[in-house]
Image (cartoon, helix red, strand yellow):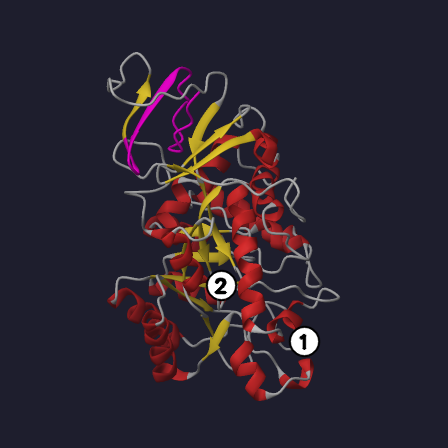
Amino acid sequence: MLIDGTGRDPVEEATLVIDGSKIVDVGESRVVRIPSDCRKVSVSGLTIMPGMIDCHVHLTGCRGEDEIYWNGGVEPVPLRAVRAVYDAWKVLDVGFTTVRDCGSLNAVHLRKAVDEGVIAGPRVVPCARGLSRTGGHCDLRTDIFDISDQSRIVSLPFAELCDGVEGVRRAVRSQIRNGAEFIKFWASGGGTWWNDRNEDQHFTREEMKTIIDEGHMCNRRVVAHCESLESAKAAVELGIDTLEHGDVLDEAVCKEMARKGIIFDPTVSIFSVGPWAAPTDLQQKSFNTARAAGVKMALGSDAFVDNITPYGRYNIGEIRKLVDWGLSAKEAIVSATLRGAEALGRQDELGTLEKGKIADILIVDGNPLGNIDVLLDRRRIKKIIKAGREMARVPETMPHIAS
């Protein structure tokens, strides 16, 4: 059975033909032409679907202590980088062939290592570091965390601090110079510490406009963390491409998002983990309002540190959360495939099993349209194919695998 990721009904008897890294034909077996010299692989009784996309991860390599994830930010950078290699492999192992890293020191380098084939991992789309204001969500405060200013500057695992129109302009250009494929900024607080309130807007409209314009000038999509209504309104009005979290969206801003084709990445799982876990009533209301307005939703887990959001198991758990919050299994799969590709601006090459696209494919034992939990069991994902090549799996003997 073929689930192509577009939202169309599945094809019960399907054939898919790969040449190199691309899909050259796909559809009902009775009409697909099979080249005489090809190697045939029978997956009778199984399901073929696109490799999934997680649009919000942080491959930090951090291991927090006592659930204070910033502790990992002052560990040696090489140690975190080595851990991130394993974390990326675990994310691939549950079926994510592409991830969008929304801020970490490691992602740009992981992208290159994965592309070179020296490590197994998903395709990594990095923003380098996100942009946070002084005193913002990602300001590693020395008076709270008892570290030196120099350690803070060197070790901050998520963000670059920047202020003012010219400051944010330089920061955007710096991230692009460092290899960013998109730009991410924290438009509001996020509840990390006592003065980092969700309801506060963290950049002025002029600063936001500069960030968005600078990113778009260099053909980078721009992503905003928005946990306040005012920050969401400003970001949407100014032309953001993807809105993250969206705790308190109203009908007006959701209708504008739908009209402009802005992707909503609700990151449902993050509202129930960590020391900042919050009641989900507001988030559920925003989710429902966005869905009713026809806003496109992508899947993003916000995995950021292994002992709080275990890489692999936590990432795939987001698809279960989307169903729990009201999406059908088919809608949740579209969020994890086509919508993710749209969030990246790469829907012409990723996200669905269609002729001409990159062959990112999962072969699954079971029908996730009938039971989404099939995808939560890594043992039922029989093969993971990325760009036409079968990927190595995490051995059962390795610790912390997402079983």
Q: In the visual, does 313 lie left or right of 22?
A: right
Whether 22 is among the magenta residues is yes
Label 1 sits on a secondary structure element that is: loop
345 versus 64 height, above or below? above
> Which residue is labeled 1 in the image?
194
Q: Residue at x 48, y 57 (%)?
A: 244
Q: Residue at x 49, y 72 (%)?
A: 159
Work out how far the residue at label 1 is from the one at label 2, CA to CA, in angstroms: 18 Å
Report the amino acid beneath label 1: Trp
Q: Residue at x 28, y 36 (%)?
A: 20
Label 2 crowding class (10 Å Cα cut-off): few <14, some 14-19, many 20+? many
Report the amino acid beneath label 2: His
Prevailing secondary structure of the magenta residues = loop
Q: Which residues are magenta?
A: 1-23
Label 1 crowding class (10 Å Cα cut-off): few <14, some 14-19, many 20+? few
> Which residue is labeled 2 in the image?
225
Residue 285 picture location, percent across and down: 58, 49
